[in-house]
Image (spheres, rainbow, N blue to C red):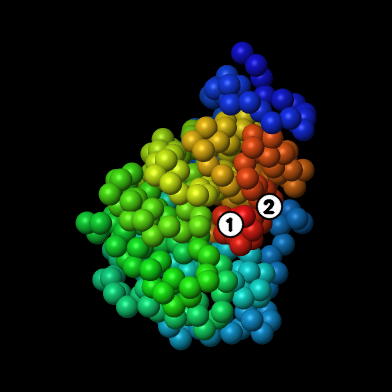
């Protein structure tokens, strides 16, 4: 059985080799992240700039005026100042309370509020006012709804395109429990990029994404591509206790399911109630993952401590 390369050559890894690169779990690693209460000191390369500037202030005013929910703020994104300062943003629809309770996520969990049927037009109008050329739309999970929010998803994309004919879009979707008729509503409105995040490696999925399934997320990504989505995308957080070989295997799994774009970034604990950071991954290690992913043949790879799934999203339409 071949082993994963210690050095990454400038050669594309053939698909026939992927399946041979099976990564065994070393059971000496802790299987439960929460069992380790050790506080890991934040290193110097994790530095978040305070959000300032005219464009940031303008977008902040717009979000407050229309009562919009952005994952930038509720998800504690470290790039909020940079992205908003450039006049770009990720809009979160279907409210700001999620039906799932993922241990890494800063979004509130509980019983969501009623659907705001005017939300698609609100988001579309805001994008028009800001003259945004490329927008990322995401949402909380709405397992409480019969259609899991897929109708509002489709209507939001339609409204955005109607008011902003030249816009390009990325939709960062939940798994819709893998139900194809809900996924089809996303496919039918033809976003340029459809993204669904794996978030972590297989071994840690139950702990990190308690109501999600690793294989189901892979199946969602494969289904989207098979149904004609031009560019599929996924993101992985690092620093939750995963091993290097597990990250390599996750990248292989994504490529085997025809994912085009991948992002890798450092997990940052939103609060003391959330899963602790087990390790701050060094920039050099992110570079190793970036080169490995590029050698697998991904169209775009973003890998770095402060990278998030929507970081530099406008690049990913090419």
Frontmost residue, 44 versus 184: 184
Whole-percent x, y for residue 300 in the image: 64, 48
Label whose residue precedes the other's in the sequence (1 or 2): 2
**In the image: residue 173, left or right of residue 247:** left
The single residue placed furthest to the left in the displayed view is 146
Q: Nearer the viewer, residue 302 or 158?
A: 158
Q: Which residue is mark 1?
A: 317
* Residue shown at the point (52%, 83%) measured from the top left: 129
Q: Is residue 31 left or right of residue 308?
A: left
As displayed, is residue 287 above or below residue 272?
A: above
Q: Residue 305 has which mark? A: 2
Q: Which mark is residue 53?
A: none
Q: Is residue 4 shown left or right of residue 218?
A: right
- In the image, taking residue 18 as reference, residue 116 lies left or right, namely left
Q: Position of residue 72 (x, y in %)?
A: 54, 67
Q: Position of residue 131 (x, y in %)?
A: 56, 79
Few, some or many C-alpha atoms within 10 Å of disc 1 (few <14, some 14-19, many ≥20)?
some
Badge 1 marks a residue whose secondary structure is helix
Q: Quadrant of the C terminus?
A: bottom right
Q: Nearer the viewer, residue 135 or 318?
A: 318
Q: Are marks 1 and 2 in contact (CB under 8 Å)?
A: no
């Amino acid at each position: 059985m071949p082993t994963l390369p210690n050095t990454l050559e400038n050669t594309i890894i053939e698909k026939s080799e992927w399946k041979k690169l099976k990564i065994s779990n070393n059971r000496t690693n802790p299987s439960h992240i929460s069992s380790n209460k050790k506080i890991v000191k934040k290193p110097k390369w994790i530095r978040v700039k305070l959000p300032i500037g005219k464009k940031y202030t303008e977008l902040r005013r717009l979000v407050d005026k229309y009562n919009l929910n952005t994952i930038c703020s509720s998800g504690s994104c470290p790039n909020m100042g940079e992205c908003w300062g450039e006049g770009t943003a990720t809009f979160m629809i279907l409210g700001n309370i999620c039906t799932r309770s993922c241990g890494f996520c800063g979004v509130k969990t509980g019983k969501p509020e009623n659907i705001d049927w005017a939300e698609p037009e609100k988001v579309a109008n805001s994008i028009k006012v800001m003259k945004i050329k490329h927008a990322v739309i995401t949402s909380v999970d709405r397992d409480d709804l019969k259609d899991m929010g897929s109708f509002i998803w489709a209507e939001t994309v339609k409204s955005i395109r109607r008011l902003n004919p030249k816009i390009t879009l990325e939709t960062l979707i939940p798994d819709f429990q893998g139900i194809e008729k809900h996924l089809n509503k996303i496919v039918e409105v033809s976003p340029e990029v459809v993204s669904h995040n794996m978030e972590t490696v297989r071994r840690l999925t139950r702990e990190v994404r308690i109501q999600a399934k690793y294989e189901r997320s892979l199946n969602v990504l494969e289904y989207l591509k098979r149904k004609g989505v031009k560019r599929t995308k996924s993101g992985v957080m690092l620093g939750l206790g995963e091993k290097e070989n597990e990250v390599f295997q996750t990248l292989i799994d994504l490529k085997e399911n025809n994912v085009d774009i991948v992002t890798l970034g450092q997990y940052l604990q939103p609060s003391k109630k959330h899963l602790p950071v087990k390790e701050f991954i060094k920039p050099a290690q992110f570079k190793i993952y970036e080169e490995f992913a590029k050698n697998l043949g991904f169209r775009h790879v973003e890998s770095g401590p402060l990278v998030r799934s929507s970081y530099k999203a406008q690049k990913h339409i090419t």
